[in-house]
Image (spheres, rainbow, N blue to C red):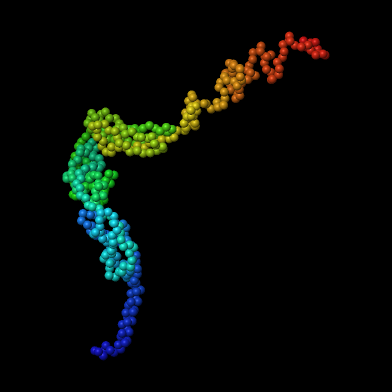
Amino acid sequence: MPYIIRHNLSLKILSIVGAIAIWAAVRTQTDPIVEQRTKIHVFTTAAPEGMQVLKVEPSDVHVSLRGRRSVFESEAIDALKLVADVADAQVGEQSVPIRIEHLHSGLELVSMERQRVQVVVDKIVIVSRAVQAHTRGRAAEGFAAKGWQVQPNEVTISGAAANVHRVTQVLAVVDISGASATVKREVRAQARDENNVTVDGINVSPEKVTVSVPIQRVNTKTVPIKPVIGQVPSGWELVQVQRSPTTVTLAGSGSALAGVTAVDTAPVDISDLRGTSAYSVPLQVPSGIEVLGAGSARVTVTLRRLGGSRDATGAGESGDTADADRTQPGQEGRPAAGEVDRPGTEPSQADTQRPDSGHPKTDADKPKPESEKPDAVDGGKPPKKPAETAQPPAAGASATGR
């Protein structure tokens, strides 16, 4: 046996070394060592008793790892996680260290983008809140919901103090669409803020409550909705008013419904409107009458600028309507009827009846009686003297001239 081992020992050792070298070369080619950068989510350890982690910033951190390609292609990467240690955290915002966990033996951590993250910790608050029911949809025609009942009518909500303080109501929403009898359902209680948005991070106990909504037959009447529009701004005119929906269904006693022919909206203030805008306004429903469905309407108002505004003299710009006080076209710069740009001369009846010629009237334009023609101005020549005052003719003149 020893002879077999020692026989050609050097050759055997060389063969083994060569085989290992070949195996290593092949593995390097088929499954090389690579370095990869990946993003890992940051979790936290358990917070101190009576506290809750609200935020981790950043919530993901990049790390660089080295290892065989086959390891990266396995589920080893999915098992990795970063953990922020908040065991000693206090209320408020602070920086805490992070560490990597579940690192595969075939992987090596080369670098980590950061060693610490910012966390916000708050105290846990537990309070009791009343539950209110909220109906969704419309009951069958001629029926309406008459109140509601919740069991239990109070729940406990818990969470970070900042989140609990945002909760203004706990609602249980029940769909009564098409119902003609009492609706009884088990629904989830929802913690909501002042904007009716669900608040995250709140635990409600119990999670579900039972809501009963009685559905009763009622007298109904459908009437049109009449928008009430406020004062139109100066310089603008009302062009169009639209409302949606156009009608509303009312429920109540027969005598109460008999006197209702339309339902007004609350006045729509358009004092600042320029152009078109939509308004959501409540309906003005008489007492003793209930609205089946939404109690508001959407009113769209369109205004148009007027063509212009009047000045102090009453003359209007383009687009104004004509009136008695406005100067008529073609009258600008002309004297008023009966006025003549000549001092000391009274207008005659002919002046006021003669059509305008575009220039001031003179005595030459006035028609004269036949008896006054000798005194008329003839083209600017001097008037003839009377016969009795005529001078004797000059020497050599004919005697017939007298």
Q: Residue furthest right?
A: 396
What's the residue at 45%, 33% (across, down)?
Answer: 306
Tell me where residue 267 appears, x and y as whole percent.
Answer: 33, 33
Relative horizontal placement of residue 384, taking residue 361 as reference (left or right): right
The answer to whether one can see residue 185 in this image is no
Tell me where residue 362 appears, x and y as whole percent.
Answer: 63, 20
Which quadrant of the figure contains the C terminus?
A: top right
Q: Residue 94's image quarter?
A: bottom left
Q: Is residue 137 above or below residue 370?
A: below
Tell me where residue 124 appears, x and y as whole percent.
Answer: 22, 52
Which quadrant of the figure contains the N terminus?
A: bottom left
Which of 180/135 is in front? 135
Q: Residue furthest left?
A: 152
Tell me where residue 205 appears, x and y as whole percent.
Answer: 19, 50
What's the residue at 57%, 25% (across, down)?
Answer: 334
Q: Is residue 209 above or below residue 331?
A: below
Relative horizontal placement of residue 147, taking residue 7 as reference (left or right): left
Q: Residue 251's image quarter?
A: top left
What's the residue at 24%, 59% (across, down)?
Answer: 88
In this rendering, the count of numbered labels is 0
Which of 230/350 is in front? 230
Q: Residue furthest top?
A: 388
Which of 248/36 is in front? 36
The answer to whether one can see residue 108 in this image is yes
Which of 125/147 is in front? 125
Relative horizontal placement of residue 323, taking residue 339 as reference (left or right): left
